[in-house]
């Protein structure tokens, strides 16, 4: 199978190969639950805590899987990536582990913790103006100049296979808990995470319905699925979900979504703040706004009532103190 | 072996039996790490995240192990416990799982989240004045009146064996990570957790040094070890570590500590706030003050330099929003 862009959709074997590569390198994050959370929502909720993954988000999985696929010469020349901050840390930490030089193009207004950590993992950070410059263009220029390999944030079969290992773990861990899942909800920016999970769980019996969760104004996956082709977000919208601001779905994730997603759920900034406050109280997890989007969707009642056993991916925890406290203060209800 | 109080010290077999009983009931909490944290401390730190345990603290382990040991008649009459809040939730949640009525004697000034959750798990909460009343006396009176079984917070071989399962998991998980541990540090109130861990790891080769961590003014384990007999804390001292305020070590935990502890490290409220802020930033974990005491001790440089591979138990995450935000605001440094 190939998508619009001509890249192959990774199959289950590619995701299983990624899982073997990541074994002992990435954390098998826990699948948590809370009777308090279940009571709030009126369903059984299993929370896949990727906020506890190395670098504080799932992005480490796809980044490491991709870097492990590079040959020796490419590794020596180094890698380049563009990212709002989580892919940045994922690539930087994976590159550091493998001794590969890394340059990351990041928004000048990214959360301070994301920029600081990316530098702490040894990468060179190149800031850009999110409203006026093209990060893709900057990254491609650097890649050309340095003959470095560009590591895309989501539109790449190796990246998607890496993120798909989250789905394999959800399948195994929910089975160990004796839960037959009705649905899985995961945050969606370019669609690499939810796409990878959908591929990992495709063919499960009974069928599991996979949903994306997106911020209001950045519901490009929802609108693209409705339109039957990829459509972009307006450049004027704002969201506190700094990790979910990709302009449109990736070509490959969109092709996967058309085949395997049950839909996409949309959440407001207030929904997200509430979910962050609930994760603090019920789960003892620090979540960043975008990392809480899927939990926010389920808490907001966006999921149809038939889904009683639901896995929710909380995808990241890289949040500055001020934003977190504001979410706790405003999100408790 | 029997301690001063005549109760047997649980052996490794008792801890392994507890692990089998808890299998599938308690969460196997992850052993996390962070390059940022390692860099701060200059050692390799493995963080056993018991804040992610059911009920938000390790106490669920000992409570469930004890309740599972009760016969049918005793279960029908119900259980009573006294607790600052984490043992309360542990007993309440374990009792709810087994359909056992539970009454919990709790300080009137316990964190709101602890009292609310204990009630949410279906227990009857009896508040008392921490400065003027004896919780032991109240709990014993209720146990007598209701013919209910008193579930002690730490001075009980079944409770200690349950908490000791944390030690078994640390041993297995650190081995899977390829780490040979030099030391383990765990918070200490009555000593059930650190005692159980010490028993679980006793006889490890090479020997692992086990340390308690206690708040300033509540360093009764440290002073008891120095005196060679149990000594109490002054009743006038204060600490933000609401879960570590037991008046003196339990008889059984003290007997274990004399045989197996390398010492006890003391931390200030400011050390604890800093550790809570570091756990937020580096680990994405919500910790309560007492739950952060062992991490605080290691961050404060209390551990001798020889210990390069150190497991730190973060034992609970039941903290109200105001206290957490105050720790983030004052603890960042």
Image (cartoon, coloured by chain):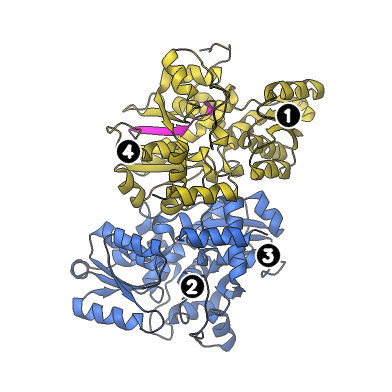
Chain colours: A blue, B yellow
Q: Is residue B185 magenta?
A: yes
For marks 4 and 2, give the CA distance. 37 Å
Q: Residue furthest right?
A: B145
Q: Quadrant of residue B317?
A: top right
For marks 2 and 3, give the CA distance. 25 Å
Specify the subunit that label 1 lies on: B
Label annotation for residue B309: 4
Element at badge 2? Answer: helix
User: Label 1 crowding class (10 Å Cα cut-off): few <14, some 14-19, many 20+?
Assistant: many
Can you see residue B53? yes
Q: Which residues are magenta?
A: B178-192
Residue at the location (45% across, 33% down)? B186
* Residue designated by label 2: A244
Label annotation for residue B79: 1
Ranked by sequence position, the earlier of labels 1 and 4 is 1
Query: Which of A250/B305 is in front?
Result: B305
Left or right: B80 in relation to A61: right
* Residue designated by label 3: A307
Residue at the location (55% across, 88% down)? A228
User: Label 4 crowding class (10 Å Cα cut-off): few <14, some 14-19, many 20+?
Assistant: some
Frontmost of labels 3 and 1 is: 1
For marks 4 and 3, give the CA distance. 44 Å
Pointer 3 and pointer 1 on the same chain: no
């Amino acid at each position: 199978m190939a998508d619009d862009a001509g890249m192959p959709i990774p199959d289950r074997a590619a995701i299983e190969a990624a899982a073997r590569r990541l074994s002992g390198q990435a954390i098998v994050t826990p699948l948590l639950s809370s009777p308090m959370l279940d009571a709030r929502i009126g369903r059984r909720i299993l929370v896949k805590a990727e906020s506890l993954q190395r670098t504080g988000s799932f992005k480490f999985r796809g980044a490491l899987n991709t870097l492990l696929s590079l040959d020796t010469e490419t590794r020596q020349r180094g890698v380049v990536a563009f990212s709002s901050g989580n892919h940045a840390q994922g690539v930087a930490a994976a590159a550091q582990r493998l001794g590969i030089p890394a340059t990351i193009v990041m928004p000048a207004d990214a959360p301070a913790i994301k920029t600081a950590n990316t530098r702490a993992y040894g990468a060179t950070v190149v800031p850009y103006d999110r409203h006026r410059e093209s990060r893709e263009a900057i990254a491609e220029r650097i890649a050309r100049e340095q003959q470095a390999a560009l590591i895309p944030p989501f539109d790449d079969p190796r990246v998607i296979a890496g993120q798909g290992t989250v789905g394999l773990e959800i399948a195994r861990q929910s089975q160990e808990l004796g839960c037959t899942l009705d649905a899985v909800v995961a945050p969606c920016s370019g669609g690499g995470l939810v796409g990878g999970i959908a591929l990992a769980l495709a063919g499960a019996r009974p069928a599991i319905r996979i949903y994306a969760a997106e911020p209001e104004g950045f519901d490009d996956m929802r609108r693209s699925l409705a339109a039957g082709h990829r459509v972009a977000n307006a450049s004027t919208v704002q969201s506190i979900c700094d990790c979910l601001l990709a302009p449109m779905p990736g070509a490959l994730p969109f092709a996967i979504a058309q085949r395997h997603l049950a839909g996409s759920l949309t959440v407001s900034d207030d929904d997200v703040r509430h979910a962050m406050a609930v994760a603090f109280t019920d789960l003892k997890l620090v979540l960043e706004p975008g990392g809480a989007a899927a939990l926010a969707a389920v808490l907001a009642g966006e999921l149809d009532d038939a889904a009683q056993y639901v896995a929710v991916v909380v995808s990241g925890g890289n949040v500055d103190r001020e934003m977190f406290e504001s979410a706790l203060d405003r999100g408790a209800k």
